[in-house]
Image: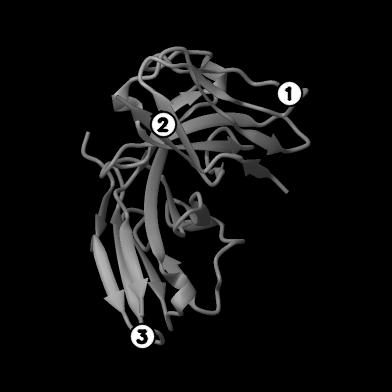
Amino acid sequence: AQRVTQPEKLLSVFKGAPVELKCNYSYSGSPELFWYVQYSRQRLQLLLRHISRESIKGFTADLNKGETSFHLKKPFAQEEDSAMYYCALSVNYGQNFVFGPGTRLSVLP
Amino acid sequence: EAGVAQSPRYKIIEKRQSVAFWCNPISGHATLYWYQQILGQGPKLLIQFQNNGVVDDSQLPKDRFSAERLKGVDSTLKIQPAKLEDSAVYLCASSSYRGRGHYGYTFGSGTRLTVV
């Protein structure tokens, strides 16, 4: 069965500091990995997909199949990055997801 | 485009009562999903519809939960009777195929259910 873990429930960093949100998954095949974000009082929304290999709002994530990880990184955190971040796995082209428990990122001034 | 609409936003009921949630997906989205998000956890898929047919309901507690999408557009999720552990946010999402193996996926704002 597919599973996604995010070891940190809460991550606090100061503005301008680097941030890394950890995500590990278990799946024997070739999954698609995603990061979703939920800002305060807003809907869950897609941040980025590993297939796109893009940088969104300064965030990047690299799929490491050897370590089964998909950590989210940003070199300089901003206060507006404060939100809940969910790592998600899909095995059918993003038709449905297995979500991790989420990490709350708090960027302090 | 208009987003995924859900109602009500909040609902408080007593255990053993019944409750229903409504979802209107983005126009033209053939696939509709219901997720349950318990406090402190990520969303968990309950059921997936393709048009008005069920694709996956393996995690739906069928003894008390039911869902329908009669005309392939709106959907209703019902809980009867509710238990305390059903307290959660119920999220609806819809998707459409955008080509190159990519689905555009949009979540609604959710219905927060409290069972007392």
Q: Can you identify the residue that label 2 sits on?
A: A46
**SS of the residue at dot 2?**
strand
What is the spatial separation of the Cα atoms under label 3 and label 2, in whole angstroms?
35 Å
A16 lies left or right of A88: left
State the image coordinates of residue A59 (x, y, percent, origin top left).
45, 18
Q: Quadrant of residue B86?
A: bottom left
- Amino acid beneath label 2: Leu
Q: Chain of mark 3?
A: B
Q: Chain of mark 1?
A: A
The quarter of the rendered structure image containing the C terminus of chain B is bottom left
Identified at 52% across, 54% down, the residue is B45
Q: Residues within 10 Å of mark 2 (few under 14, many from 20)?
A: some
Q: Quadrant of residue B21?
A: bottom left
x and y percent of residue A6 in the render? Answer: 59, 39
Closer to the N terminus: mark 1 or mark 2?
A: 2
Q: Secondary structure at mark 3?
A: loop
Residue picked out by circle 3:
B17
Furthest-bottom residue in view?
A: B16
Q: Is residue A79 found left or right of A69 in the rendered image?
A: left
Q: Is residue A27 above or below residue B16?
A: above
Q: Amino acid at mark 3?
A: Gln
Q: The N terminus of chain B appears in which quarter of the rendering?
A: top left
